[in-house]
Image: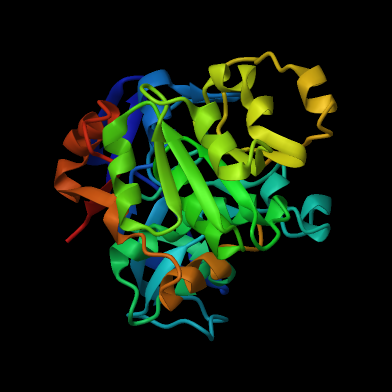
Amino acid sequence: MKALVLEKKGDIRLRDIDIEETLGPGDVRISPVSVGICGSDIHYYLDGEIGSFTVNAPMVLGHEASGVIIETGSDVHNLKVGDRVCIEPGIPDWSGKACREGFYNLDPGLVFWATPPWHGCLRENVVMPESLVYRLPDNVGNEEGAMVEPLAVGVHASSKANIKPGDIALVLGAGTIGYMTAFAALASGCSQVIITDIKRDRLSAAEEYDSVLPVCVADSDLSEMVNEKTGNRGCNIVFETTGSARIYDDVAEYICPGGTFIIIGTPPCSVGVNIGALQVKEVTVKPIFRYANVYDRALALISSGHVNVKPLITHRFGFNDSVEAFKFAATLPQGAIKTMINFS
């Protein structure tokens, strides 16, 4: 089938590839319709690795997807051919201990799209278990369906933050995951979310949303803004989504006593942390990895209208232009947030 293949670091091609996926009794075969380009896809394209995950062989990219079911297994009863769906892109070993304890995202044997050595979904069809496929309501478009995956990251992060009604949160980084985390934090009860970035143009989308306050840290004092909005106390929760090692130098000053620091972005190297500054505030530090048990909740937030992801989709390419789409997204062009690839 035709697929967008990362041959090696810096080399992507749209070409035919042999992928054999047998349809099991509980599986469905899906033809992708919309696929978002994630920051992790770009990292694999530019760097060839993320943390311990290294591209050592050709790999199909893409994991944020919606599609249409084109075939069902004999034991599939809740979905049918023609259904529009979104797909949770990680298949765990359901018999493993991590899964039995409710942490299937931490299963060492997890097969996750576009994470070496597993192929992603930028290809003509994919096979997934019915349990990881969700029918899209009529009021949710295909592009919105592809955005359920990054929103699930934000929902998972917010659930780990134990948000209380009226909390004020700070989100570091105004990429797709940053915005999704801000939306999830508001839906979870935060009264306001401050979102930051070094690029002012990436913050322009915040103007579309009530209770999201953009701060460009390149020309504004973040500490002053945090103190102004929190009465010099600090934010209840700080979410780190950038993956920048420099963030850790000053993060403690933005958090209130007894506050929580949620780590979402993956830094490219070991980072130094001022443990003493966190200790004197008894800050709770929680790193998260992807998500678990929240995909249906993320879809419900979009379907209900509580979260509007449409303004974040800033650029679109056809599947036949996938190589150009990745080269475009890799340059972090002005005003770009989410680049979407559409098959039709």
Q: Residue at x 25, y 26 (%)?
A: 331
Residue 79, placed above or below residue 277: below
* Residue nearest the observer in this picture, 249 or 44: 249
State the image quarter where residue 326 is shown.
top left
Position in image of residue 182 (x %, y %): 50, 51
* Residue nearest the observer in this picture, 168 or 24: 168
Residue 75, placed above or below residue 88: below
Position in image of residue 268 (x %, y %): 54, 19
* Residue nearest the observer in this picture, 112 or 177: 177
Q: Residue at x 26, y 35 (%)?
A: 201
Position in image of residue 104 (x %, y %): 71, 53
**Can residue 268 be seen from the camera position used here?**
no
Q: Residue lying farthest bottom?
A: 77
Left or right relative to 281: residue 185 = left
Position in image of residue 19 (x %, y %): 39, 47
Q: Residue at x 59, y 15 (%)?
A: 269
State the image quarter where residue 5 is shown.
top left
Residue 300, placed above or below residue 47: below
Q: Residue at x 44, y 26 (%)?
A: 57
Left or right relative to 24: residue 331 = left
